[in-house]
Image: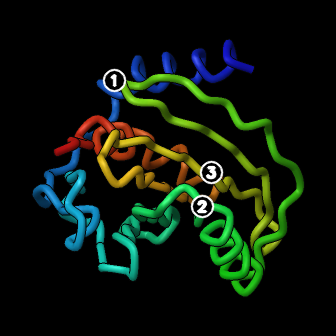
Amino acid sequence: MKKILHAFALAAMLAAPMLPTQAAAGALQITGADPVAVITIPDSWTHAKVERGLEIKAPDEEIYLWFELVPPGQIEALQKEHDAYFAKEGVKFTSATETITQEVNGRPWSFTEMQATSADEPSIVRYIGINPKVASGKIIMMTYWASHAGHKKHDGAMKTMLDSLAFK
């Protein structure tokens, strides 16, 4: 599984220079109450504050992202909230990978990918836990929901955004 993830990451990095770039909207705090990290999003993407962080949408709404700061003991409850939202939106989960943990830029990240359908089209849902290494012990939970077409179309923008993630 790690070899597959590494192959996808390498392919995305190699393809990124060939993709059109988008202007950045500037650095956004993931959460105002406990500013542990900032992320830069493209100008054409929208964002809104949510209870525990930030919601970001691609201009065509083919990708939805949530960055939320939660104590480790609340991660399961957060996932259940998102699962309820997905059910309301007609998303049906068809399979999941095992959770894989690896270091990214010196911080532990955990990745769980769920295959799903939405309006009978294939979708991708990812839960990514990022340890910002803060005294509170809180975790940044990134939830990613995309159509397969949106996932491919916005791969370069997603790579740029994730590369911009900066911890305080």
Instruction: Determine whether the residue tagged by mark 1 lies in a helix, strand or loop.
Output: loop
Residue lying at 10% horizontally and 57% vertically, measured from the top left: 26
List the residue tagged with mark 1: 105
The picture places residue 161, in percent across and down from the top left corner, at: 30, 45
Q: Earlier in the sequence, mark 3 or mark 2?
A: 2
Mark 2 nearby-residue class (10 Å; few <14, some 14–19, many ≥20): few
Up/down of 27 relative to 160, above or below: below
Farthest bottom residue in view: 88
The alpha-carbon separation of the residues under discs 3 and 1 comes to 20 Å
Q: Earlier in the sequence, mark 3 or mark 1?
A: 1
Look at label 1 and name its amino acid: Asn
Residue lying at 29% horizontally and 73% vertically, measured from the top left: 46
The picture places residue 160, in percent across and down from the top left corner, at: 29, 39
Query: In front of the other: label 1 or label 2?
Result: 2
Look at label 2 and name its amino acid: Gly
Could you tell whether 24 is left or right of 8 in the image? left
Quadrant for residue 112, please give it: top right
List the residue tagged with mark 2: 73
The alpha-carbon separation of the residues under discs 1 and 2 comes to 24 Å
List the residue tagged with mark 3: 126
The picture places residue 107, in percent across and down from the top left corner, at: 39, 29
Q: Quadrant of the C terminus?
A: top left
The alpha-carbon separation of the residues under discs 3 and 2 comes to 19 Å
Look at label 3 and name its amino acid: Arg
Residue lying at 41% horizontally and 25% vertically, measured from the top left: 104
